[in-house]
Amino acid sequence: MSRETYRKIITSPENWEKVNKENIKLMNMFLKEKNTRASDTTINSYHSDLSIFFTWNLLENNNKFFIDIKKMEFAEFFSYCVTELKWGSAKFSRTKSCLSSLGIFIERLLDDQYPTFRNIINKSIESLPKVESREKTILTDEQILKLTNYLKEKEKTQELCWLYLALASGARFSELLRFTTDLIDENNTAFNGLFLETLKTVKSKGRGKLGHLITKFIVKDLFLPYYKPWIIEREKVMKENNQEHNSLFIRDDGSPAHSGTIRSWLKKYEKVLGVPFYPHCARHRLVTYLSKIGLSSELITSLVGWKSESMYKIYNDLTSKDKNWKELDKLEEHLKNN
């Protein structure tokens, strides 16, 4: 039961052959310059967004040169994205940002060739209101226990380690794959010895070629019972396959695990639980768990590695009735005395 997303694909090699060559040239110059300071993930995303835009421009807008496209035509593109491609607010905003960045690039570096060009994207295109386009999973204690027992029965030591690293750290999907054996030392702790602190920083989502480097903190007693058995088993697999690398998670042949490896696990977990399962639901679980036992939003923000407490509000799924309200003691005392 994956979190299904509607997809209508308009790009194809055949269509791309017909796209205005000046637009392709402009796109390649922009991405090459952007690549000096943006992550590979950002570059790949921008390439995808521009490919969609210039294919739409071919099919619906007479294959116009980017410089000559009018406000209303940009508005028609984004309307098409919402009505035909069924984009949500996140994809809408990213593509708007991408096209605006292309406009800024032209103004900044190609003004001698196009002196009258003005970047009109942000001024003419309103942002799409943010709405949840896919079902959110809030993991219960019972669901976590069910999945844990399933993995124990199947002797999936590695998957238990991955699951509890996600639950105990709140790390993003890409961050979990970047964990290595030399990041973790069970004696390197923080916050009264309750958390493991990574020995080095981990690349996270952020601006710049290197992204945002952060120290990760892991709830020690949640993670170590599953980490230790996996380290022993991992060593055996590595020796049997003559592999030498420090990736924490591996494939059957001992080579480093990739995103496809993890996604195959997630599909299995969805079948076991009967609900969508994705790494961010583990982050929701950690933030909600720490909030419920009384940790402050400031501390949780530091532990997860956010720059502001605004993200805490997104990932804290506690409802009013789940919170421990000290004021209720006053009501209880009043009722006893009357």
Image (cartoon, grey):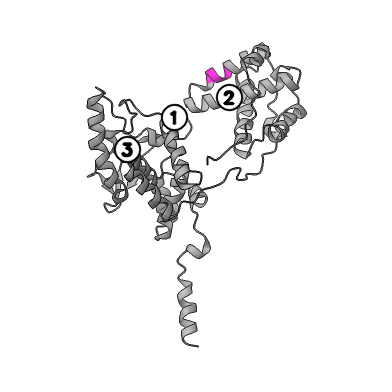
- In the rendered image, residue 309, in percent from the top left (x then y), is placed at 48, 50
Q: Secondary structure at mark 3?
A: helix
The residue tagged 2 is 48
Q: CA distance from mark 1 to mark 2?
A: 20 Å
**Name of the residue lying farthest toward the bottom:** 338
Q: Which residue is mark 1?
A: 260
Q: Report the disc number at residue 71.
A: none
Image vertical order of residue 38 relative to residue 155, above or below: above
Amino acid type of disc 3? Gln
Q: Position of residue 257 (x, y in %)?
A: 37, 29
Give the residue at x 48% y 63%: 322
**Pick the front one: 5 or 272:** 272
Dot 1 alpha-carbon crowd within 10 angstroms: few under 14, some 14 to 19, many 20 or more: few
Q: Tag 1, which secondary structure?
A: helix
Name the mark on residue 158. Answer: 3
* Magenta residue span: 29-33
